[in-house]
Amino acid sequence: MAIDDWLLAQHLSGKHPPTLRFYTWSPAAISLGYHQRQYPEFWENLIWQGEKLDVVRRSTGGRAVLHQGDLTYTVVTSGLNGVDAKRLVARHRLQTYQKICEFLIQGWRSLGVELNYGTAGRGYIHNPNCFGTATGADLVLPDGAKLIGSAQLRRAGAILQHGSIRLRQDAELFTQIFGSQSWTQVQLPEYLSLEIIITALMAAASYCFDIELVVQPLSSSEWEEILG
């Protein structure tokens, strides 16, 4: 996620174009929302498959997310048509989420999976588990299970939005962290590999944003700057 923050800073300085990024996590980790100060102490000592789980803090809001068996996406952009990113009241914030999330809806639809926005209100702040509730910024399956949780950071007219897409998480690890009442099974077609999902989402982003995506890895000097 340090790369996400770096991409936002680069975009703000005019050194980097809008970016779409996908990544997974190794070792598994729990990311905390920027304002989430309280969490169970035992999270600091969790072991999964012989490795300690990292506990990291995001620069975006929301609640805790388990990054295991998930796919993280990132969008860094600015100048969204019809959205004032500098003066975002609640209604405008929802507009930005929905403008960006459109590629997720269209991409998953191309894979035969229908998604809708969640409807939960402010009560989500009392739930330490991001996937325990689904707000209007989140995407749920027809059975109500939350597939994608998203969060934003807005700075000087630019937006960093990233989110976790639940794919094949370990039920035992999830319930160990959040409790058995928090677990909901996500039913997805077995043939959907990471490559198939990412390809579909990239095609949808090209169509929804009317852009041409250029795949570009980070250079060695960029890695040095990020890890700095």
Image (cartoon, helix red, strand yellow):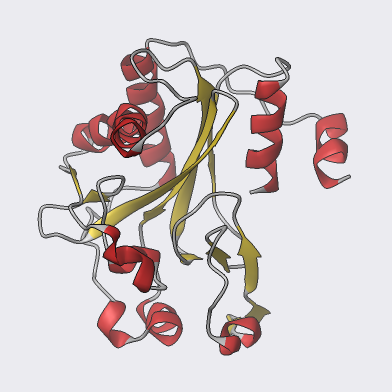
Q: Is residue 136 above or below residue 37?
A: above
Nearer to me, 75 or 200: 75
Residue at the (15%, 42%) spot, across then down:
114
Please state, as top left, top right, bottom left or bottom right, where the C terminus lies in the image: top right
Picture coordinates of residue 19, whole percent (x, y): 56, 25
How many numbered marks does the figure carry? 0
Quadrant in which residue 207 is drawn: top left
Q: Is residue 195 above or below residue 92?
A: below
Quadrant in which residue 13 is drawn: top right
Picture coordinates of residue 145, whole percent (x, y): 20, 61
Picture coordinates of residue 98, whole percent (x, y): 29, 33
Q: Is residue 222 above or below residue 212?
A: below
Q: Is residue 219 above or below residue 164?
A: above
Q: Is residue 73 left or right of residue 49?
A: left
Residue at the (37%, 16%) spot, across then down:
209
Q: Is residue 170 left or right of residue 40?
A: left
Residue at the (39%, 84%) spot, across then down:
172
Residue at the (45%, 27%) spot, across then down:
87
Nearer to me, 22 or 18: 18
Nearer to me, 215 or 10: 10
Quadrant in which residue 179 is drawn: bottom left
Picture coordinates of residue 116, whole percent (x, y): 17, 44
Q: Is residue 197 left or right of residue 214?
A: left
